[in-house]
Amino acid sequence: MALNPMEQFEVKPIVPLHIGGYDVSFTNQSLFMCIVVAAVTLFFAFAVSRPKLVPGRMQSMAEVSYEFVASMIRSTAGDAGLVFFPFVFTLFFFVLFSNFLGLIPGAFTVTSQIIVTFALTVIVMSTVVVVGFAKHGLGFFKLFVPKAPWYLIWLLVPIEVISFLTRLVSLSVRLFANMLAGHTMLQVFAGFVIALGAAGVFLKPLAIAPMLMILFIGALEMLVAFLQAYVFAVLTCIYLNEALHLHGEHH
Amino acid sequence: MDLQAAKMIGAGLACIALAGAGNGIGIVFGNYLSGALRNPGAASTQTTNLLLGFALCEATGLYGLVIALIILFT
């Protein structure tokens, strides 16, 4: 294969910078993070710059997305969860915009780096732990004790603890792996097109097949890009709900 | 057998995880459809759970894929 499908995930420094033995260079990763943040900020600042009673196209997009996230929090974490609306909204739109920006050919996908998604997950889980302890004190540990007969408790508590700890891995790897797999697949099929195009006269027309495949995978990736941002936000809400209500008492 | 060949075989084996993910996605959508056709009124309230189940299933297959990539590229 002429093209290495993993080449697109390489972090390249744009402005090399070393402080105290640490590499803090401004990379293409940091550049695209800045672009994502600027795009989200500009979109919402522009959409609600001249608010009208009857919203126009841009304003209703902003209003629909506000209502979408708010209803997501209300249905999973109850009205008490609305305190975390700015947090969940920011997370959702950061992930959504970086997923969609990554689909532009030549752009760098911020969320295809495990360290980015892991950092987001650490923020989410430390919020859950801090909120849980602030609200329930040591009663937060009741989260790990499900309602069960006494002879099952000793078996279930370790399982609950492990499942709580593996959320750090599952939440971050889910987003990272989805982005990585999708972009790798696109690149592999692009490699097929190039290989077939460079082949003999009879094989050349066959290149249209992987080309069509790229189109379908691209459409699928649009769905996945939205879905993963949505799932990340919903799971954040569910974890916050557990911290707020311990065993889902709000329903 | 040298290390390189063993790595290739291991990466291929790790991708078997995707079979389970395929099964899971089929079960999620199949059961949603059969439930939704029996009770269309309740179908729209369950789309969140549907998408959540789909994403959770799909992710389990991708864990296998990540392991395959780790085997190949480290």
Image: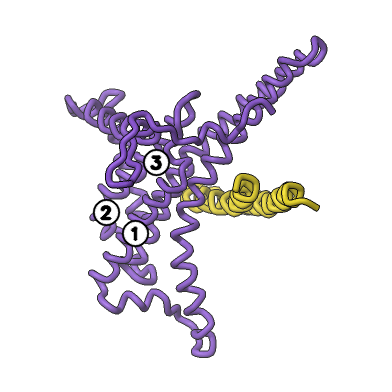
Q: Residue furthest bottom?
A: A151
Q: How far apart are marks 1 and 3 (CA)?
A: 20 Å
Q: Return the x and y of residue A23 as percentages of the image width and height.
A: 35, 42
Going by the numbered disc 1, the residue's amino acid type is Ala
Q: Which of A226 and A80 is in front in this view?
A: A226
The residue where tag 2 is placed is A84
The residue where tag 3 is placed is A95
What residue is rendered at 59% in x and 52% in y? B63
Chain A: give its colour.
purple
Q: Which of A249 and A244 is in front in this view?
A: A244
Q: Which of A249 and B20 is in front in this view?
A: B20
> Which is more foreground, mark 2 or mark 3?
3
Res B34 visible:
no
> Which is more foreground, mark 2 or mark 1?
2
> Which is more foreground, mark 1 or mark 3?
3
**Residue at disc 3, secondary structure:** helix
Q: Earlier in the sequence, mark 2 or mark 1?
A: 1
Q: How far apart are marks 2 and 1 (CA)?
A: 10 Å
Q: Is residue B44 above or below residue A132?
A: above
Per the rendering, the mark at residue A52 is: none
Give the letter of the chain under mark 2.
A
Going by the numbered disc 2, the residue's amino acid type is Phe
Q: How far apart are marks 2 and 3 (CA)?
A: 17 Å
Q: Do the residues labelled 2 and 1 touch (CB within 8 Å)?
A: yes
